[in-house]
Amino acid sequence: MTACAIEDGTAEAAGTGETVEPESDEPDAAETPTDPAEASAEQTADALDDALDTAAEAAGAAEPPAPGETVLPAFTLTADGAYAARLTAARDASGGTGGGADAAWFVERWTLDGPEPYAVPLPLDQPEEADSQVLPLADGRVLIGRRVADRHTFSLLYPTGPGTGELLLGAVACEAMTLLPPSPDGTSAYALSVGEYSTSLWRVAGGAFGPEHLADLPGRCSGGVWLDRAGRLLALDREPAGGGPVKAVAVDLGRGAEMTPLLQIAPDSNDRLLLADPDSGLLLIRSDAPGHDRLGWGVLGSCLPVRFPECLRLPDCAVTPFAVQPGQMLMPESCAVALRIDGAAGSWVGVWRPAGRRLHQLAAPVGWQAGSGVWSREGVLRLPYANGETACAVALLEAPEDVEHGVGAAGPGCGESGMQPSAATMPPPVCRPVPLGQAPLVGRTAPD
């Protein structure tokens, strides 16, 4: 999928010579600064404090959000949000994990799809290393990958009465190996081993005979975003072996790991795919095509270019999307997107919709497993957390509504309000599905 970039000024579509108009996307003054270059540090801090105070009052909290519990490695959810897994350590008297250099790490599985969430510890006779990787499966078992000398071993852990059962899957001899996000099929697990000129793709769980080598992909690949519900189409960020810009590519696991281009905003830009929603086709992208790294969005197979909303730029903060509302068929602009915002005050939650063009900043529960959460189809965000009061809990956060301010074209002599839809005012045409790598966001005409 090739694309063009839209920022504050007029941009030229890559490879087409066409000129596209910028997206008017000014944030609401009460929630985010109008322009980071024009807002002073004091105004920015005041705006952020007001937003967090408002969220805390709505949640009945007296304090602003605190940083989430530090756990290595990261908290990982299954694709459907039913289970989660993490490495944790024995809690001390204050309720903290006490994750120091001498901590005894063990695997913990969370069950989140029942009436009440609960955690199941899965310790073995020996503690785990802090750099072990864990990944939950849809049947409740947890895959763990361990570094043992020059090999990476993989096992499945599961509760067996008072103890923990372990099923050894096998080992792979390589220098480094990274687990990919959980597959949507719930039974398979994949990993990448990056070499100097190529990247080995492995299925480490879900196969017939332990770890299976699937393909050697040219270049250095990273990331990992699933594009469908069947666990067949995988998007990776690929850097050419000889160096060059990073581009997102699609790997078809059903066709021998065939690789095709997915994103090309500009010839020399680094274009990475962060999230994708299979139902609506909404893509969350990070690219430096506008001149510096920006968070943008597009729609797979759409006629519209990639947009880089101004409201997603926060001074002195890192903004990372982590969940997209499912079930919004043919309505990508109405999908609620959850974002992790990291700043000097800690981590908190952002909620944004492409159509609303407004970033809502909300307080996260104390002990939030920062960067993790899952949306329901009804627009309720489930945020897992653990603190001194509870070892496993889920906070429910309803997506705020975006207040409409005169949607439509601005009158003569009036600037755009920033609340106009990003598409035309008429219903967008339904685009014919095309294969990945042949779905440009520009250069196509809609049927009459």
Image (cartoon, rainbow, N blue to C red):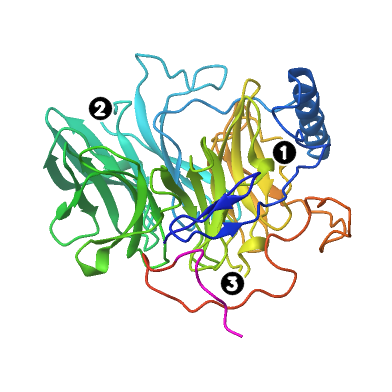
- Magenta region, residue range: 440-448
At which x and y percent is residue 365? Answer: 66, 35
Name the chief secondary structure element in magenta.
loop
In the picture of the structure, the residue carrying the numbered disc 3 is: 329
Q: Secondary structure at mark 1?
A: strand
Circle 3: is it few (<14), some (14-19), or many (20+) Cα within 10 Å? Answer: few
The kind of residue tagged 2 is Gln
In the picture of the structure, the residue carrying the numbered disc 2 is: 126
The kind of residue tagged 1 is Gln
At which x and y percent is residue 356? Answer: 74, 54
Q: Name the residue at 75% across, 36% down.
A: 32
Compared with residue 222, is residue 56 higher up or lower down, i.e. above or below? above
In the picture of the structure, the residue carrying the numbered disc 1 is: 361
User: Disc 3 versus disc 2: distance between alpha carbons?
Assistant: 48 Å
Left or right for 318, reference 173:
right
User: Disc 3 versus disc 1: distance between alpha carbons?
Assistant: 26 Å
Q: Is residue 136 visible?
A: no
Compared with residue 368, is residue 130 higher up or lower down, i.e. above or below? above
The kind of residue tagged 3 is Met
Quadrant including the C terminus: bottom right
User: Which is nearer the eye, 349 or 63?
Assistant: 349
Q: Name the residue at 51% across, 36% down.
A: 293
Q: Nearer the viewer, mark 2 or mark 1?
A: 1
Q: Nearer the viewer, mark 3 or mark 2?
A: 3
At which x and y percent is residue 123? Answer: 33, 34
Compared with residue 110, is residue 441 higher up or lower down, i.e. above or below? below
Magenta-drawn stretch contains 61: no
Magenta-drawn stretch contains 441: yes
- State if disc 2 and disc 3 touch (CB < 8 Å): no
Q: Is residue 390 visible?
A: yes
